[in-house]
Amino acid sequence: MIYLLTYKAWLLKFIDVDLPIGDIAKDVAFDKDFPNTKDYDIILEYLTTAGSADSFMRVFEYSYKMYYESTQK
């Protein structure tokens, strides 16, 4: 059931995509501490605390919107 997917599980589907979303998917795949949750605020706090680059944050914001819209149907 698609709505049970966490953001991390959803994002990892893009790991082989040669676009910025694929780049952050690779980063997340190697980050053992990345939160495996659907909760935007928890992920945002983690990324902010970790000092993520602005470019990473932009792709995260865009991809989280895609994730949210694709899992709320």
Image: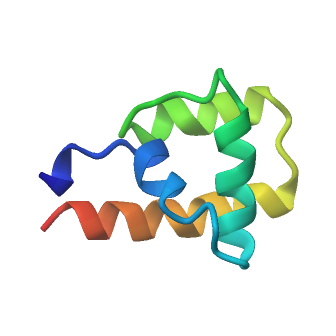
Give the image's coloring scheme: rainbow
Q: In the figure, residue 57 lies in which quadrant?
A: bottom right
Pinpoint residue 51: horizontal percent, then vertical percent: 86, 35
Which residue is rendered at x = 39% and y = 62% of the image?
Answer: 67
Q: Who's the residue at 33% across and 61% down the image? A: 68
In the depicted view, which residue is nearer to us: 45 or 72? 72
Left or right side of 62 for 50? right
Tell me: 15 left or right of 49. left
Q: How many marks?
A: 0
Q: Nearer the viewer, residue 70 or 1?
A: 1
Which residue is the extreme one toward the front?
16
Which residue: 66% across, 42% down?
Answer: 28
Residue 54 location (% of width, % of height): 84, 57
Q: Is residue 4 left or right of residue 55?
A: left
Pinpoint residue 35: horizontal percent, then vertical percent.
53, 28
15 or 42, which lies in front? 15
Percent x, y for residue 66? 42, 70
Question: Quarter of the image containing the C terminus?
Answer: bottom left
Quick check: 1 above or below 73? above
Question: Residue shown at 75%/46% (left/top)?
Answer: 27
